[in-house]
Image (tube, grey):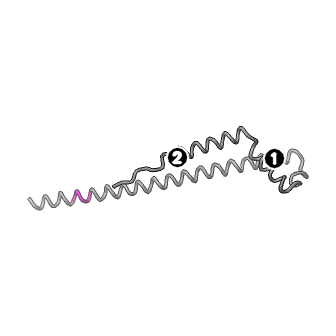
Amino acid sequence: GLATIPFEGEQVRKKKESEEKRKNLSSGPSPAKMAGSERSRSMPNSLAHLDHESRIYIQEKEQQLLQSQETTQILQSKISRLEHLLQLKDLRIEDLDMKLKGSFKRSTNEIMLK
C-alpha cells in the first residue's frame, strides 16, 4: 500500500509558531536590543566605547542576522518537507510500476492461454 502524508498538522503547527515568532518580534523589544542588553550584561563595556550611531548599526545588523537565521530555519524545514514528499512520490511510482508490471504479466499470460 501507499503511505499517506502524515505531516499536514505538523505543517500548520509550524506555520502558527512562525507567525507567533513574527508577532513577538514586532510587539516586544527587538531581538537586537535584547541581544545587545544580554551582551552588555555579560560584557558590560562591550558597546560602551562605541558612539551611538555605531551601536545602532550593530543592533540593526544583529536584527538582520536573527531574521536571516529564522529564514534559514524555515527554508530548511521546507527542504525537509519537500524531501519527504519526494520519497512519497518515489514510493508511489514504485507501487504503480509494480502494479503495471503485474497487470502486463497477467494480460500476457491470458493471451498465451488462449
Question: Relative to residue 80, is residue 11 depicted above or below?
Answer: above
Residue that label 2 marks: 11
Question: Relative to residue 30, is residue 49 depicted above or below?
Answer: below
Which residue is drawn at the image coordinates 17% and 60% (left, top)?
A: 108
Name the N-terminal-most of marks 1 and 2: 2
For the image, the number of numbered tags is 2
Q: Residue furthest left?
A: 114
* Closer to viewer: mark 1 or mark 2: 2
Residue type, label 1: Tyr
Residue that label 1 marks: 57
Q: Nearer the viewer, residue 70 or 29?
A: 29
Q: Residue furthest top?
A: 27
**Which region is colored magenta?**
100-104
Which residue is drawn at the image coordinates 45% and 50% (left, top)?
A: 6
Residue type, label 2: Gln
Which residue is drawn at the image coordinates 8% and 59% (left, top)?
A: 114
Asked which secondary structure carries label 1, the reply is helix
Could you tell me what secondary structure mostly forms the magenta stretch?
Answer: helix
> Would you say 50 lies left or right of 80 here?
right
> Would you say 70 lies left or right of 105 here?
right
Position of residue 64 measured from the top left corner of the image (x, y, whole percent): 72, 47
Position of residue 67 measured from the top left corner of the image (x, y, whole percent): 68, 47
